[in-house]
Amino acid sequence: MIIDIDFSPTISKSYKIYIDEEKEIEVSGKLAIITNEKVSSLHLEWLKKRIKNDFIIIKIADGEEFKNLETAEFILLELMRHKFDRKSTLIAFGGGIVGDITGFCAAIFLRGVNFIQIPTTLLAQVDASVGGKTGVNTKFGKNLIGAFHQPIAVYCYSHFLTTLPKREVGAGIAEMIKIATTFDEEFVSFLEKSDLNKSEDLQKAIAKSIGLKAKVVKEDEKEAGVRAVLNYGHTFGHVVENKTNYKEFLHGEAVAIGIKMANELAYDLGLLSEDEKGRILALLAKNEIDFDFKIEDLESFYEAFFLDKKSHNDKITFVFPKGIGGYELRDNIPKEKVLNSLKKFCK
Ligand SMILES: NC(=O)c1ccc[n+]([C@@H]2O[C@H](COP(=O)([O-])OP(=O)(O)OC[C@H]3O[C@@H](n4cnc5c(N)ncnc54)[C@H](O)[C@@H]3O)[C@@H](O)[C@H]2O)c1
Ligand SMILES: [Zn+2]
């Protein structure tokens, strides 16, 4: 399957997302594959056979703590050492971490070179690899340095996922449920009926998620409007990640908890019925991502909303589902209302 994202007339760039398409990769200039030890030991041999150019391989350390400027500098200096020029291309071969940092290096190396995304985790396939958000973390927070830089192509292969740990699969499914709940009731029904342990169902769900994400990004590349809806579950999820020191839950798992929290508040606001709230909860449970997270201290949980780079002028923008398949953005919810809903998650 091929999805074509055409950004014209806003910007000239257009690119294709190939899903399980047998394609050979060929570029005109020098080529570097950025990856890590784990991904390269599992899947690089397979990829090599499909690349027609010579290439160098740059391996970076595995883990969110290495998605930083130091690793970016290491990649950039390797490119310079190998005399890469403006016509060169980078391939991001790995999960969202490799994708974000490779995209960032591509955005700033010689003021911008081409890059290709070949995502190998479910989360990277359905979310991170499409849309051109690139960046690194600092000690002040995640993704605080970055650039919008679109890839020239994305190649998704579902067979990479056969080696992915189950928890990582669940984290990707949470992002799928996120986009389905706010944009597409039919997709929610599909997820209810399907079994994502079966590769055929998973493949369909991946294609559907990517299609939805591509549509949103096309409408609003720089997140001035509808793209913000993709933060559903994230406003709460980021606080959960922060409060557990980024150690207890994978990002997608924290998003699953955030979805439950957002839904409770949406229910209290009359945006979601009891039945609809139950449907999403059942979907999380069915995919084993219905976690039991307990808030220690409500006040300090609330304060942490303001650490998010998306909170402006003391206002928190919440994304809610409006029924199943719809959404509503609100930045005027009184603190008491938020705390009242969150009480259900307290010890
Ligand atoms: N740019 C965006 O729009 C966007 C969106 C969502 C998330 N992100 C970013 O993505 C990152 C998270 O990405 P992730 O969830 O893919 O995590 P990740 O990149 O850390 O990958 C998870 C783990 O799986 C391993 N792995 C990768 N592919 C594998 C495979 N096929 N088989 C076995 N193991 C494999 C990795 O080496 C790693 O240990 C975060 O830094 C987040 O900020 C970016
Ligand atoms: Zn996310």
Image (cartoon, grey):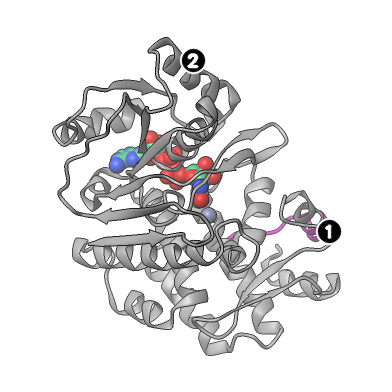
Q: Residue at x 61, y 57 (%)?
A: 237
Q: Which mark is residue 51?
A: none
In the image, is residue 287 above or below residue 68? below
Q: Mark 1 is on which residue type?
A: Glu
The picture quadrant for ligand 1 comes to: top left
Q: Is residue 296 magenta?
A: yes
Identify the residue position indicated by label 2 in the image.
Answer: 77
Identify the residue position indicated by label 1 in the image.
Answer: 299
In the image, is residue 27 above or below residue 338? above
Percent position of residue 156, x then y: 28, 50
In the image, is residue 68 above or below residue 205? above
Percent position of residue 49, x then y: 13, 33
Distance (Cα) linking label 2 and label 1 = 45 Å
Percent position of residue 173, x then y: 40, 61
Q: Residue at x 52, y 75 (%)?
A: 182
Where does the magenta region start and end? Answer: 291-302
Q: Quadrant of residue 227?
A: bottom right
Q: Is residue 339 magenta?
A: no
In the image, is residue 332 above or below residue 137? below
For label 1, count other residues whose C-alpha is less than 10 Å away and answer few (under 14), some (14-19) or many (20+): few
Percent position of residue 13, x then y: 44, 51
Q: Secondary structure at mark 2?
A: helix
